[in-house]
Image (cartoon, rainbow, N blue to C red):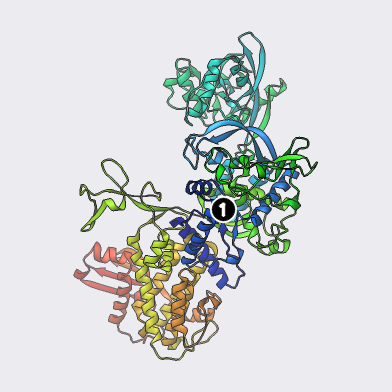
Amino acid sequence: MFAYPSGSLHMGHLRVYTISDVIARYRRMRGDHVLHPTGWDAFGLPAENAAIERGVDPAVWTEQNITKMKQQLKSMNTSFDWDAEISTCSPQFYKHTQRIFLKLFHRGLAYQAEALVNYDPVDKTVLANEQVDSNGRSWRSGALVQQVKLRQWFFRITEFKEALLQDLEYLSEGGKWPERVVSQQRNWLGRSTGARIQFELKNEAGVSTSARVFTTRPDTLYGVKYLALSMSHPLVQQLAAQNAELQRFLDKRASFPPDTKEGFELPLKAIHPLSQENLPVFTAPYVLEDYGEGAVMGVPAHDTRDLSFWKLHRPSDPIPVVVARSNGEVETLYTLPHDLSEAFTNHGTLTSACGPYAGMESQAAGIKIVGDLQERNLAEPFETWKLRDWLVSRQRYWGTPIPIVHCPSCGIVPVPEEDLPVVLPPLVSSVKGQPGNPLDKIEEWVNCVCPKCQKPARRETDTMDTFVDSSWYFIRFPDPQNEHELCSQNSARNTLPVDTYIGGVEHAILHLLYARFVYKFLCQEGLMTQERGRQEPFQRLVAQGMVHGKTFSDPETGRFLLPGELAVDGDLIVMKTTGKVPNVTFEKMSKSKHNGVDPTAAIEKYGADTLRAHILFAAPVSEVLQWDEEKIIGIQRWLGRVKRLVKDLSVRDFSSSLIGANDAFDVSKLVNSDADILLLALSTSRNIQNTFEKDVYSLNTAISDLTKLTNKLHEVGIQNLTPQVAEHVMRALLRLMAPITPAFAEECWEELTKKDSMGSIFDVIWTSDVISPEQESALKARQRLITCAVQVNGKLRFTTEIPSRRPDQSAAIGKEERETEILETILATDEGRLWLTEKNDWERRKRVILVGNGKVLNVVF
């Protein structure tokens, strides 16, 4: 995923771009045509606010940040295709964003409507639902969001809800997308099947009206004790016009916390459609206006939220238990709210409180109840979705202008495509820092001529949500200079959909859902040709975990400590003022916690390749990475060991004829260490290729495999290997390292191959076949293993694999030598150490009995 140009990269950038670069370099070494582009998600409110604070134009501020961050990216040893670089704030880019808007508009999928929206009173802009956190605060400013009615632009994403849901099955097949991301999208789409039930309402004068509720549990209908309407429900609004107390309650909606149990009882009674009982009617903040019918039936005994609400408003009114566990038996059919510790929310059997439906299973009873009410026109099976149309209006300057003109005569008029782009005007100093939308105040830009009637008109001054830019930017990469199309059909056919898309799991709903919607629309319009898979933009999604920093806090106050407040005292880190040891945790990196790490400074200190390897090794890709610089020493030692091995080889004088995958060689002439190291190199190569191809989430194991091979080379000693084998394996090791530590591997490769003038390591085609299949078989025959049953005092304790007698070993090898070989192998295993050195004292062994050349070993203590 491309970066927002804030001015400085963080460790999350280093992690995601290291992962993408490793995959890109590997695919290139495999001989694939690889497009590994990047760009800048350059529009947005943060840039606008930062620029205004500094008295500069957002365009200037953004361009300065891009220049700085581009150099930072290059310092990471990334291999981006800079010729494909894009920036969403460039008119050459957002011209096509405006084209997409017009396509949606002409298909009736972009429309303007008045809606109750989330308004940020600090940033003075509208927020999408997804940009409001669980506490009702803005994702950017942290301000409590207000609910106001404004005329806004929407994209009709709900028209694609079925396709968006159905194709999640395709994305979950074979682990194309992480299951947690698929699950989050499925939940956000939120398809629910149930019933719509009509309740008659009567006011104090006996005048009737009605309200419909949606429920997924019609089997609980006999348990309804009240109705609750949303605060914007038409009936509530009508009553508020004549009820000042109700209006005051509605005016407080922004101050209610998300889990509020508040409610206002309305001067209405609902008639239960089955029992004919009179039920109270409330308006309550917890009822969502845009889900179902904006009304819910309250069933305290069988809904946790309803139980909490009823306990507050009717603590002394008994509630019926209408569904019980499978046998249908309950201690009591009616209970006081505070005697019920929790609601029973599962399906079960209807109790005797349910009249003619008593004894029926929940699902069957629900169907029967809806069917009976349907005969009276009081219910119908119904499906509802949580997904709502995408609100794309933003009352800010720094965004893609919406290509619409408002004409007094013609109404809403789209800007002709040939007149695109509608370019943002310079941000004049007279409007900087003023509240509201700056574009409203730039009259020379707002005032225009209607494209239809040529009379005076005004431009739309809302700009598009930045998620519109990021919903299609990846389509631009294959053809970034194309002035007439988003991407030519030929370029799209060769490059799209994206094979591997990498980014944080925090984008699971917003960005990815919008990108899927826009891509499906463009395919439907014939602007994209989809030949591979479904109409999905990203064939494989890699969602990496966050990077957490080491965080120090005062053990008494919990205050986060600055680095300057800490000192080193021997092996301890202590607080300078008190000498006490602070609490140490790993938290999400942030300025407030003083635990951020500057990637540029870290690169200058350790080197880019050391950091790349460490960031891959420190945690599996999908997990949180706890950034601890004290552990980088392990990677430094590994790279230092590789460097020494290369140096040892480079000073040796021998023929450069190497063992290739197609070369024949006499296995019998190799020493045993040759066979061991060649087979380990082959296994390492296959493991790493499998990781790169199929299990990128286990990149940390690739570092482990490379370290094991390096350590084995060091342990055996270059001088103890046949020279051709030593160089062959070292070259294989460097090729395996190249995608991960590109500069280091290239430097070592140059040193190792200088006599052969082989060029760049990245010009050597990748192969996992370090040796040929015939060579592999021959070497394995030398090393065939047998199972050894290990006994202690005659009792079997474990079995393990040991090398059989090799062909090059004389039949007359002494029993003592064979015993020593077997014992060394067994003592090197975890179980061998456990049973022979930890649970028993190896030095006090009385006898060692070897049977069948190693099939049984009995150690007597």
Q: Residues within 10 Å of mark 1 (few under 14, many from 20)?
A: many
Left or right placement of residue 93 versus residue 580 in this view = right
Residue reaching furthest to the top? 205
Labels in figure, total = 1
Tell me if I can see residue 322 in this picture: no
Residue depicted at 30% across the width and 66% down the height = 832
**Quick check: 645 above or below 460?**
below
Q: Quadrant of residue 789?
A: bottom left
**Quick check: 608 above or below 1?**
below
Quadrant that contains the C terminus: bottom left
Residue reaching furthest to the right? 453
Residue reaching furthest to the front? 430
Quadrant that contains the N terminus: bottom right
Residue depicted at 48% across the width and 34% down the height = 144
Q: Position of residue 680 (x, y in %)?
A: 43, 74
Q: Position of residue 323 (x, y in %)?
A: 53, 25
Left or right placement of residue 583 versus residue 24 in this view = left
Left or right placement of residue 379 versus residue 553 in this view = right
Q: Amino acid at mark 1?
A: Ala
Left or right placement of residue 618 versus residue 535 in this view = left
Residue reaching furthest to the left? 844
Q: Position of residue 209 (x, y in %)?
A: 67, 16
Front position in the image: 122 or 390: 122
Give the labeled residue for mark 1: 59
Q: Position of residue 689 (x, y in %)?
A: 52, 69
Q: Secondary structure at mark 1?
A: helix
Front position in the image: 584 or 334: 584
**Quick check: 201 above or below 397?**
above
Q: Quadrant of residue 336?
A: top left
Front position in the image: 317 or 11: 11
Front position in the image: 673 or 332: 673
